[in-house]
Amino acid sequence: MVQNSSDTNNTPPAVPFWYDPQKRMLAYQALALLAVFFCGYIIFTNTQANIARQSIATGFGFLWESCSFDISESLISYSAADTYAKAFLVGILNTLKVSVVGTFLALALGLFVGIARLSSNWLVAKLAALYIDVMQNIPTLLQLFFWYAIFYQSLPGPRQALNPTDGVFLCNRGLMLPLPESNPAFFYMLIAMLLGLLTTILVQRWAKARQDATGKPFPVFSVGNALVWGLPLLVWLGFGAPMTLDMPHLKGFNFRGGITISPEFISLLIGLVMYTGAFIAEVVRAGIEAVNKGQIEAAKALGLKKGKILRLIVIPQAMRIIIPPLTSQMLNLTKNSSLAVGIGYPDFFSITNTAINQTGQAIEGVIIIMLVYLTFSLSTSAFMNWYNKRAQLIER
């Protein structure tokens, strides 16, 4: 049997790799990777040579040496005899404190102003727009200086401190508040509150499944409030309702007792919240305006009130649009907290900068700063991405 010449030539001719898009792409990526490694090698060798020439100590062994400097605010016990590692931990906790509190307050403020921006009341809408325009166009650091100056120049000293109510004082040293004295009841109250939150989540899931099946709503909000606040109240009453407070009092040139919120922390918190809240307000406004108007008209046709339309119809749909840009604003607030060094608040960046000045190990200090803020950002992004997936529509 004679084989056709056409059958013997079925295999395609070999194509040079520079004509194959896939192979060219791999070659370009390999070249780019080699270039990055080469640049990194140059930087590393030059750095090592300069460090050796100047006889600078390297490594992270300094973390276990005594830091020999005080920190004005700390959530844990700390003294100048502690190590640099503990000082860094104090800075991380201080940064987390202002970031977490600031994020929640900025979200609340941004949601309120964003809704007010769309109000049918002309005055409310214009005031919200004015706030957004002013706050967005004043740099964050200037806002921190402004609030810090108010505390130190507008408020009186400790001896003339403002006393709006018993046990509460406001002066240029900060805000002094009463603090409940240590009692075992508070630990069990915290457990009871966490148990109430967990039960509320379970009730909310059950109520949603019940409403999907029967159409009957369940008062989850009222039941949740009763659980979250009622259970700790019962525990408090069960322990005899302890009410002993450690009251702040003037002693010498400052206050003793109670809890003192420093002017640096308050100034940093207000500045970050006011600045970030303006951007969150615009994100909320854009998300609400992106919801189809037909959804609102349908809800009005069913007789729903404005509050329920906003809470049950508009906000849940707007959240799918709001979450991605909202994540960026939350990350910005955490990173902008490093501006605290300008007003003397001992955040992580400020403490690490002091450690670098004392030890001279700038490279290690900068690496630690980068890793810590990278961890903050990745953790926030991971949580918001998880929440974003839960909020998205599930298509069939």
Image (cartoon, helix red, strand yellow):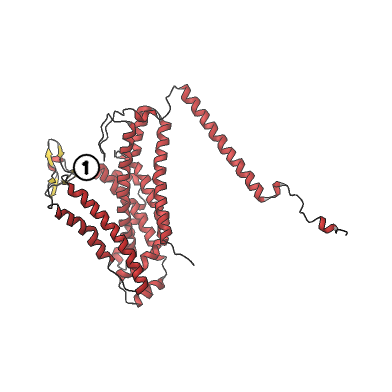
Crowding near the residue tagged with mark 1, few <14, some 14–19, many ≥20 C-alpha atoms within 10 Å: few
Give the image location of residue 151, x and y in percent. Answer: 22, 44
Q: Is residue 143 visible?
A: no
Q: Secondary structure at mark 1?
A: helix
Q: What percent of the width, then of the height, locates residue 350?
A: 33, 37
Residue 319 percent across, percent down from the top left: 39, 61
* Image point (29%, 64%), residue name: 123
Give the vertical position of 10 relative to 58 (above or below). Answer: below
Q: Using the image as rendered, state which of residue 338 and residue 309 is in the foreground.
A: 309
76 over 50 or under it: above or below? below
Q: In the shown orientation, is residue 308 left or right of residue 323?
A: left
Residue nearest the observer in this picture, 345 or 363: 363
| Residue 210 seen anywhere in this rendered image of the structure | yes
Q: Quadrant of the N terminus?
A: bottom right
Give left or right: position of 366 versus 70: right
**Residue that extends furthest to the front in the rendered view of this protein:** 1
Residue nearer the viewer, 385 or 168: 385
In the rendering, at what x and y percent does residue 29 appear? 60, 44
Res 153 quadrant in image: top left
At horizontal 27% and vertical 68% (from top left) the residue drawn is 219
Residue at image position (52%, 28%) is 46
Q: Nearer the viewer, residue 321 or 210?
A: 210
Figure quadrant of residue 223? bottom left
Residue 281 position (above or below residue 207)? above
Type of amino acid at the residue the image marks with label 1: Gln
Number of numbered markers: 1
Would residue 50 appear left or right of 182 to someone viewing this image? right
For disc 1, the marked residue is: 153
